[in-house]
Image (tube, rainbow, N blue to C red):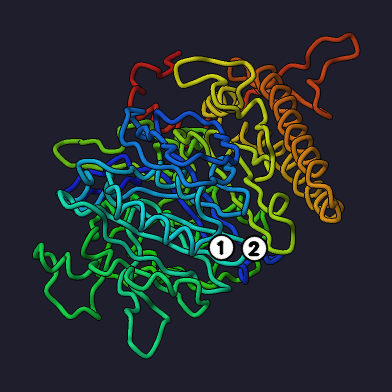
Amino acid sequence: MKRLVILVLMGCVLPALACTNLIVSKGASADGSTFITYAADSHTRYGQLRYCPAADHPEGATLKLYNYGSLKFQIEIPQPAHTYQVVGFINEHQLAIGETTWGGISPLDKGNAEGIDYGNLIYVTLQRAKNCREAIKVMHELVSTYGYADGGESFSLADPNEVWLFEITSKGSEKGAVWVARRVPDGYICGHANQARITTFPQMRKESYKSIDSRNLKYIDRPEVECVYASDVVKFAKQRGWYSGKDADFSFADTYNPLTFSGLRACVARVYAMFNRAADGMKRYEAFAMGDKSAERLPLWVKPNRKLTVQDVMALMRDHFEGTPMDMTQDVGAGPFHCPYRWRPMDFEVDGQKYVHERAISTQQTGFSFVAQCRAWLPSKLGGIIWFGVDDTYSTVYCPVYCGVTQVPVCFEEGNGSMSRYSETAAFWLFNRVANFCYLRYDAMIKDVQKVQQELETDFVRDETAHAKRWAQEDNERRLVGELNRFSNDRAERMMRRWKELDQMLLMKYIDGNIKHEKDGKIETTETGVVRFPQQPPYPAWFYRQIVDDKGEVLRVTE
């Protein structure tokens, strides 16, 4: 019988933390793109793609902000003269932003009494900034002026040339926030997953502008600037009694989001999983990822062992810790069909001992995820793509939607269904139908899903690459936008058609625990049209042993 391989908690219970981001610099990608990824993991988050057109605003115009989670009115702020178009989490200038939440220490985890929450900080910044450096400046100005009504967050920033990690926490009852932003070195990848990652950082010296504080944001456009931070990020911690050492030794993460067993096992472990599949020599950090705070710390960024393609990046967002001691497909919790999902809660207790299930990158409650791709050699409206998918990253399809489109595909459109309203035309509900059915006999059914997933994504990437080369020569912006709309909509519609076919095939093939014979995408029949008798593969031996150990006296054949 398989042993139960579920970790023992060291005096704490794992919270239901969400979201995973990967950051890929220009020099780490196969074609010179930059990438960021984002999985929005929430049991109440609906998968849809927000669209906000560019606009000019008269003097005195204002913007009402409603909390990203509760949708309650939060604050009203002045509009600038012009705002940029935003599609999901990327704008018309190929600035893309993602996030993961870590909350941080009390009393900073709830944010200022009023101000801008993390979700609106993303959307307002995308409307007002053209690149990563402008975004850092805008985010600082917004939280300084209006307050930051949230706790600790890590933001991924990407533009066609650079990628940055921006980490922030509130000042509690004080207005504003403290933060640090670091540029990911070219040729490297970075990641975060609900745990602050920036420890010590280079601080400003008179003879150098390699690092600047928020009093010197006028220098932020200098290419040598690789680190920017709030001027009081150390001072504030000292005033509150959370740090007493030298300024140069100050660690943002260790001060504002100290490591715990949970922070390592449920959060850092996901970053480790991405690094482990993309870079060499990662085994040395496995003990740290599994919860040993005394082990060698996972670095902030690593150099991948190959140049990453867009499909490599998609693949890195599909992970259940396969090939590690945390592999969710191998313990008894996976059941006889190796299902790598555990229904919540994540923690449980047996005979007074606390245990938890793993928290992997791929998880059942993902509302949506994306891979944002930014390309400096193409016109902005064509160069930026949000490869968008809904539900579980392992079984989703990443569909290309250009940052220059003026209409979102119907299947991703805001208002097309919700968490409490089913829609036949919403990708979210179709993909959930398929994924939830697969959970019943996962090891067999996921192969059928992956076959169609690979078919679609391979075609989408190939077609997009070919079209981009041709469209790059288009000098009429109106015609270009029309082509981008048609391409994005066509691929989304094709995805929906193909996934509906898959949904129907899975039902026919796997109904009632059987596995019907299939050939060339059709259920096999005899010459007279009768369905061939289905396969009925037995449970694995270890599972039968477990049944016998549990109820063998009742089930034993006695004649």
Residue 386 visible to an observer of this rendering? yes
Up-down relation of residue 296 to residue 380 (above or below): below
Amino acid bearing label 1: Val
Up-down relation of residue 162 to residue 56 (above or below): below
Q: At x 38% / y 68%, what residue is drawn?
A: 298
Disc 1 vs disc 2: Cβ atoms closer than 8 Å? yes
Residue 400 visible to an observer of this rendering? no
Up-down relation of residue 386 to residue 33 (above or below): above
Q: Indicate the quadrant where residue 410 lies.
A: top right
Residue at the spot of label 2 = 308
Number of dots carrying numbers = 2
Q: Indicate the quadrant where residue 377 lies.
A: bottom right
Question: In the orientation shown, which residue stands out farthest toward the front?
Answer: 59
Residue at the spot of label 1 = 24
For the residue pair 541 and 90, the one nearer the viewer reads as 90
Left or right placement of residue 138 versus residue 278 in this view: left
Nearer-N-terminus badge (1/2): 1
